[in-house]
Image (tube, helix red, strand yellow):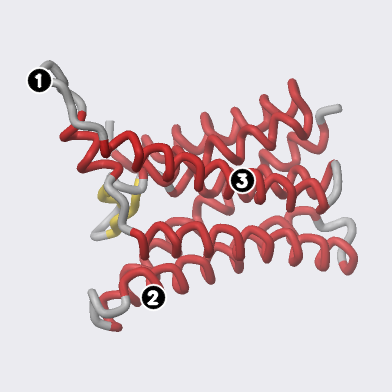
Amino acid sequence: MNNVLLIFINIIVTFSFVILIEKIFKKEGLYVWTAIALIMANILECQTIGLFNGFTSTCGNVLFASVFLATDIMSEKYGPKYSKKAIKISVFAMIVFIVIMQIGLLFVPDSTDMAHDSMSVLFSLNLRISISSILMFYISNNLDIFLFEKIKKKLPNKLWVRNNVATIISNVLENYFFIFIAFVGLYDISTMLNIATTISIVEIIIALCDTPFLYISKKLK
């Protein structure tokens, strides 16, 4: 099974879980989802995959996109103050995860241990990248909530417009700023632009796919 097909399967499964958790647990479920999704996305960001002709993506992109879907659902059905609360909870959960994981890696493994080396490779902290990731996540998702509400006031009957415009703008800005903050001095400008543009194209496609799920969520009582 090729990566392109897997990405679309991943989109359907992941976004369906967002709808399901909101259906069962309401806004509290979305609080849980945003925290879980952010942690899992940052882990899966370590795995890069090839898409289309020469496009490279990471396995965490769909989970990051699901947070935008979750906050858009929350803004639409419950109000923006709950969306902002979800983002704060997610950031706090991510900071707790990073701190506890770093403490865990300080322990001296037993001779019978088989996991420490792999965990060290996967979870060793790059402070600048971690801070950049959390900062841009917080800013971009709050920007998404702000734009979503502004467009809703101007075009109250155009759910697909506010969903796509707010998500795509926030996503693209997050990608470029994160790449430049995290990798300036490590890569040249051309390389950073290429990475950010490639990631943005993939995430725009993923963002467009979440619109039907937002409509489904709004129809569910």
Question: How many other residues sit within 10 Å of disc 1, few (<14), some (14-19) or many (≥20)?
Answer: few
Name which quarter of the figure residue 157 lies in: bottom right
Q: Residue at x 82, y 67 (%)?
A: 150
Q: Is residue 39 above or below residue 1?
A: below
- Residue 161 place in picture, x, y as percent: 74, 61
Report x, y in % for residue 81. 82, 52
Please indicate whether residue 142 sits to the left or right of residue 100 in the image: right
Q: CA distance from mark 3 to mark 1?
A: 47 Å
Residue 164 versus residue 20 in the image, above or below: below
Q: Position of residue 52 (x, y in %)?
A: 30, 53
Secondary element type, mark 1: loop
Residue annotated with mark 1? 111
| Closer mark to the observer between disc 3 and disc 1 | 1
Which residue position is annotated with label 3?
Answer: 210
Q: Looking at the rendered structure, which numbered label has been put on residue 167?
A: none
**Mark 3–mark 2 CB contact (< 8 Å):** no
Mark 2 or 1, nearer chain start? 1
Residue at image position (74%, 53%) is 84
Residue count near mark 2 (Cα–Cα under 10 Å), binned few <14, some 14–19, many ≥20? some
Mark 3 or mark 2: which comes first in sequence?
Answer: 2
Q: Is residue 48 left or right of residue 151?
A: left
The disc, 3 or 1, on the residue closer to the chain's N-terminal end is 1
Q: Amino acid at mark 2?
A: Phe
SS type, badge 3: loop
Instruction: Pick out the residue farthest to the top.
Output: 112
Which quarter shows the C terminus?
top right
**Amino acid type assigned to the residue bearing label 3 in the image:** Asp
User: How far apart in space, not on screen, are marks 2 and 1 (Cα)?
Assistant: 42 Å
Q: Which mark is residue 180?
A: 2
